[in-house]
Amino acid sequence: MIVSNLRAPLVSVIIPTLEGGENLERCLAALAVQTFADFETIVVDNSGCGAAAPFQQAARVIEKQTNLGFGAAVNQGIEVSQAEYCCTINDDAFADPRWLAELVAACRDPEVGMCASQIRLSSSPDRLDSAGLQIYPDGSSKQRGRMAPACEFSVREEVLLPSACAALYRTAMLRQVGAFDPDFFLYCEDTDLGLRARRAGWRCLYVPSAVVYHRYSASAGPASERKAFYVERNRLYTVVKNFPVWTWPLVPLYSAWRYAVHLWGHWTGRGLAAQLPAAKLGIILFSANWEALKELPQLLAKRRAVMGAARLSGWEFWRLLGRHRISARRLALQP
């Protein structure tokens, strides 16, 4: 839906797309029947071949000549938005009619900078994909409540940060802490943004009445070498940019335990690591760590900006992460 009056809409819904097609059509159709009307829809076309061109009547389309990655694409929408809130939604997700209304209503508290949706699996609508995100002490993040019955996560409560698959961000917060880091390209950019915002003192609410249905990893697949590389590299980016320096020596120890659990899962056929050859996993780990090491000077420069906006001390931030921690077993063995 596009608001045609001169006043800027209250919400900009930003949808990055690589393929357009049936998924995007369904996503836009669900937005067209929202009970909340004060919003605009911005589609950022990463295909380079006009995949979103057929949908210009349903949304404002920004066409890019190459694939910018998820975060950079969303940033394109944020840059042209004049709304008070920016919502992100994957093109392979479709929202319940009250999704936007429930998210906006949850933001009455000015300290709330982000809201997490109740994201359900479209293939099993009574099961969760995400009720916000949790974190492991080596920087790895994972969907909270994944595969659990949705009814078990029916209480509005504070969570660490939202999955950008379907989330609301206050524009004032984005101006303060910055938008998505385009260097992440794919995966974990929502973790980085969420942690920067939490370090700056913003809160995040999980809104179970804001329901979205998601085709999990429809684009990249649930397990792939590409996904494994970006997830491993980007969790290192996250650590350098956001974690207290005094925790850095602990990170390899936590990672070693997580790797051990992944290896156990590989041997027993459990978890996503079991879907990749063991030799490939070693190459991916080496490549991801080498890439992060090469980017260390740039990451440290970005860290200085993060610390410049910080309101929480390193110890307060570490305690916050501890309250929203996921175990290595659940991280590694959860499908």
Image: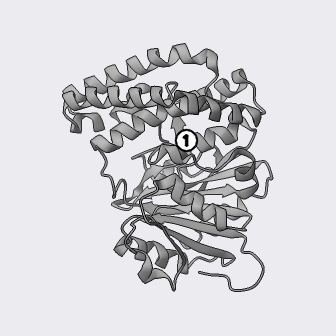
- The crowd level at tag 1 (other Cα within 10 Å; few <14, some 14-19, many 20+) is many
User: Looking at the rendering, which quadrant does residue 22 occupy?
Assistant: bottom left
Q: Which residue appears at 70% of the width and 23% of the height? A: 314
From the viewer's perspective, is residue 308 above or below residue 163? above
State the image coordinates of residue 73 (x, y, percent, origin top left): 52, 59
Q: Which residue appears at 64% of the width and 53% of the height? A: 115
Q: Would residue 210 be seen by someone viewing this image from the given angle?
A: no
Residue furthest right as drawn: 110
Label 1 sits on what residue type? Thr
Left or right: 224 as drawn, with respect to 236: left
Q: Which residue appears at 50% of the width and 19% of the height? A: 251
State the image coordinates of residue 227 (x, y, percent, origin top left): 35, 43
State the image coordinates of residue 52 (x, y, percent, origin top left): 43, 75
From the viewer's perspective, is residue 40 above or below residue 208? below
From the viewer's perspective, is residue 252 above or below residue 26? above
State the image coordinates of residue 334 (x, y, percent, origin top left): 36, 37
Judging by the rendered image, the residue that carries numbered circle 1 is 191
Check the image and tell me how it is coloured: one colour
Q: Which residue appears at 45% of the width and 45% of the height? A: 187
Classify the position of the N terminus by image quarter: bottom right
Left or right: 124 as drawn, with respect to 295: left
Classify the position of the C terminus by image quarter: top left
Left or right: 114 as drawn, with respect to 111: left
132 or 57: which is nearer to us?
A: 57
Q: Which secondary structure lies at badge 1? A: helix
Number of numbered discs on residues = 1
75 or 167: which is nearer to us?
A: 75
User: Looking at the rendering, which quadrant does residue 213 occupy?
Assistant: bottom left
Q: Would residue 103 be seen by someone viewing this image from the given angle?
A: yes
